[in-house]
Structures are given as structure tokens and as C-alpha cells.
Amino acid sequence: MSVNLGDKEKGSKQDFSVSRRGFLKTGVTAAVMGVMGAITAPSKMANAASTSLSYQPSEGNWSKLRPKANYGGASVRSAEHNDQWLGTSKITGEVQRFDEQDGGFSLAIRGLLGEKAKYGYLTQGVRAPIALSLGFTVGFVSGPEAVDGPVSPTRLPIPDPEQMSQHIKDLAYYLRADEVGIGKMPSFAYYASTMTPPQGAFASGAVPLDAPIVKTPVTASLPNVIVVAVEQHLETYLASTGYDGISNSQSVRCYHASANIAVIMAQYIRTLGYNARAQHFGNYEAVMGPCLIAAGMGELTRTGDCVAHPRFGFRSKVAAVTTDLPLAPDKPIDFGMLDFCRVCKKCADECPSKAITLDPDPVPYNGYLRWNTDSKKCTEFRCSNEEGVNCGRCIKVCPWSSKEDSWFHEAGIWIGSQGQASSRLLKSIDDMFGYGTEVIDKYKWWLEWPELYKIQIPS
Amino acid sequence: MSTVLIFLAGILFLAGVLFIKPRAKQDKTWKTVIIWALYVIFFVIASIGVSFVYINASVGHVKATSTAIFLFGGISLILAVVLARVLGFIGTKRKANDSLQA
């Protein structure tokens, strides 16, 4: 009996015995799994400990809601922001600030691009009912009381600038921005003067056509800029020629969405006790291109001052908040857009007004280098177009702008961000597969009234 | 859906391995390596093609879909024929008859 018990005990001991090799294997496996878990586990674990105001950012992360900046597969490097470079844009001299009334649409309103362009611009809303409705709602957030206002006399305690930047990015995503960045505000990004009444007041009929335009000097100079972008609707672009009845609405839809985000964000910052001014389509005090580059949201393109993001190209509209809220600015980015634009030229080939230059390289313009697209020609076509209302053909055909999310488009974007040789390859592939120029009818959801497109010039 | 497709691709890959394994071993090591390399390249290109065509067709890119069918389908077909020939699945019958007659 005792012998049997002893055998049994011996047997059970054998059952539980682990060889040294097995023990080591188990140990190594557990260690590897632990390390993998620590690497891949989301920051939720760390953040779970955070409570209260001491906002605990996920270290090195873009934001809590979107821990990694989404560049759509592009190979992105940091670039400089100093007196010689704004990202990949070379500054060659003093960049002169603009008067808003010298912008394209303002020239059209002032009749400097011809009667057809003038009345084309002023009747855009009537000719495109969806755009009119969107523009109508932009009007509610365009007054001076909406974009700016009194700052709370009591400053609420806030986290340090890095943490506050993450929080502001989270707020932007929460408010349905597709992308957000924070930059040091370039002084030349402010207009020299704004126009009163603003463009939108003419387009909406809020003021008579012959109302005198007055220049109002811009004196603001806030150190930081928060830029939010809202993507234009991809499927709608896939179904559009880029210059048909929905073109104008594509823009105004995003102006409306980004304006709301900027106005809410600016009001929130003022409530915290800091200065903040919303900058949006209905009421700008600043030019958005340099703000976008400074905020690490893109590079200049062949289309002149349009700035492309690595993920959605320039198929977006943006708004901004200029502020003195302490923030840690992002760096400008370089993802090879200049190299790509040097070899692609698809926008120039497809532009209905032939306004986009075919120059091989950027040229000096107002103290910096850019492709010198003819903005007057572009605006004149956009205002005078009678095949639709306005135009966004360059956005539609750009290989960076016209793609849905998929692994092979991410691979393509990666290829395109590797220099001129690989950009040529991407351009060839893009052409071979017919991307950009195709019109996919199954997404055409909007109504068209071609009889409205004809521009009526009063005699 | 993508999880199911990846699982299916894995199963097909393993089925292919089991199917060609009895004939893959050659007299020279480099020939064996080439056969397995050909199989992997064939499978990767065929999988990329199926995924590419599926996504483009569902979005509605007509030209991309048709071009991809010809491009990836063509390359996959050529590789499959070469592989089948090397493995002796095709093109060996006549040789056997010739030797019988001799």
C-alpha cells in the first residue's frame, strides 16, 4: 500500500516536472509576450490612471483620440520653420502681406476680371442651390461677434503647452475635424488689410452690389495658430467632373464645417482666459496657406498657394484659430510633394482654364518660391463657368487627392513620397489605372439644373 | 470580411504547399529553392491581384479593375503555367509516350 502510494506520489511528481529546456522556453515566451503587450497595448492602460484636470497625455502621441498622426502611408520628415524656410518653401526675401481685396474673388467682385466673372461670382448661390444653403449657414458664424469676443477675465488652470496641444487636437477631432495641426503663426500670414463688407456679404446679397469696399488694417499678432481641415467628399468628387453643379457645394460644405469648428474652438479658448480669433471663409484675417505649412499640415503644390496634406492632398477646406494660448507647435513636414509636383503636372494638363503652370520648378514670387499659377485666369474661369458652378478639377485629378483608403493607395503614396524617380512611377501607375480623370456615375446623388448655370449680366 | 479573406488566403496557401510538396523535391537544391520561390511569388501576386480587383471593383474604378485583371491575372497565369510545367503537372505525357515507343 505504502509502496503504491509512493509510486503514485512519484508519478504525480513526474507529471508536474518541467525540464530545464521547457522552463526556459516558457520563460522566454512569457517575456516576449510581455514585451509585445507593452509595445502594442494602447495607451488606454496608462490613461486609465488619469483623473481630474491634470490632463495626462500619452507621451509622444499625436492625441488621445488619434494617437498617431495619419499621413496615409506617406514617408514624412520634419522640416524647418525659420527666416529662410517655411517647411519646404524657400523664403527668398521679405514676404509682403496681402490686402484681402486683392484676392481672386475680391477682384471678381470689384469687376476687375470682367462683367461675366463679376456676375458669375455674385450669382453663384442662386445657380447652385445646395451651395446657397450652405453659404446661408456660414453667414451665422461669420460676424465679428462670432469669430472674436471678450476673453474671460479669470484664467482657468491648464496643463503645460505640450499637454494642452494634445488636448486641443482631441477637441478638434471631437468637433469632427478630419485633421488638425498647431503652428507658430507666421507674421506674413496675416492680411495687411481685410475688406469691408466681406466677400460673402456680396455673394449672399446682404449688401448692394455697388456698396463701397473699405480696407480695414489688420493689427492682430497672436503667436500660435491652430489649423483644422475638413475633407471634401470623396465619392462626390469621384462622380463629378470637378466643374459641374456640385463643385461649389463641395467647397462650401467644408468651409461651413471647418468654420463651426474654429468658432467653437476660439470661444472655448477665450473662456479659458486666453485670446483667440477664429479665421474662416466667412471672416478671414489671415491667409491659410502659410498657416497650414507652419502647422505641419502639408506642402505647397503646383497649383500655387494650395497646400496638400500627405493623406488627402488638397481635397479639403480649412479654418484656423489664432491664439496666445500656450501651445507646443508642430514642425512643418516634408513628404516629397515638391518632387512629385515637378514630375506629375496632371493638374496643369487637366485644368479647364489652363491656369496652372507647366514650369519645371517653383519660381520667385513675393519673397518666396512657388509655382506661379495664374490665379486671375483660375478665378475668371471659376466665376464664369457655365457648365456648372465654380471648379475643383485640379483637386479631383491630383493623385494625392483622389483616393479612397486602401492598402495599395497607401503603398502608392509611400512610393510617391520617395523622390522624383518614384514619383514618375506613381504618376505612370495612376495614369495606367485611370485614377482621377474617371467619372463614377453610381455616386452621382445631386440634382442639376443646367438652365441655372447661364450667367445673367444686367444690362 | 477582410479577416475571412485573409484566413481563406492562408488556407489556400497551405493547400498549395501540400499539393506541390510531393513533386517539389528536385535532384539539385537550387531547383527546389526556385520552385518554392516561384510558388511564393505566384501566390503573392495572385493575392495582391484579387485584393486589388475586389477593392477597385467595389469602389467603381472601372479602368483600374479591368487593367488589374489583365495585369495581375496575366502574370499569375504565366507563373502558374511555368510552375506546373516545372513540377510536371503539364507537358510530360508526350515525353513518356516517346520513351515508351523507343
Image (spheres, helix red, strand yellow):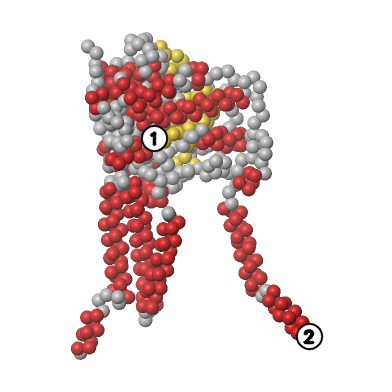
Discs 2/1, front: 2
Report whether mark 2 lies on the same chain as mark 1. yes
Inspect the image, locate mark 2, and give the three-letter code of the amino acid beneath it. Met
In screen coordinates, is B67 left or right of B7?
Answer: left
Q: Determine which of the numbered discs, if any, sits on residue A1 in the image.
A: 2
Up/down of A18 relative to A260, above or below: below
- At numbered mark 2, what does the secondary structure look like: helix, strand or loop? loop
Q: Quadrant of residue A200?
A: top left
Inspect the image, locate mark 1, and give the three-letter code of the amino acid beneath it. Gln
Q: Nearest the camera: A110 or B47?
A: B47
The residue labelled by disc 1 is A232
Farthest residue in the left direction? B101
Q: Nearest the camera: A211 or A345?
A: A211
Q: Nearest the camera: B81 or A451?
A: A451
Earlier along the polypeptide chain: callout 2 or callout 1?
A: 2
Give percent across and percent down for residue A310: 42, 41
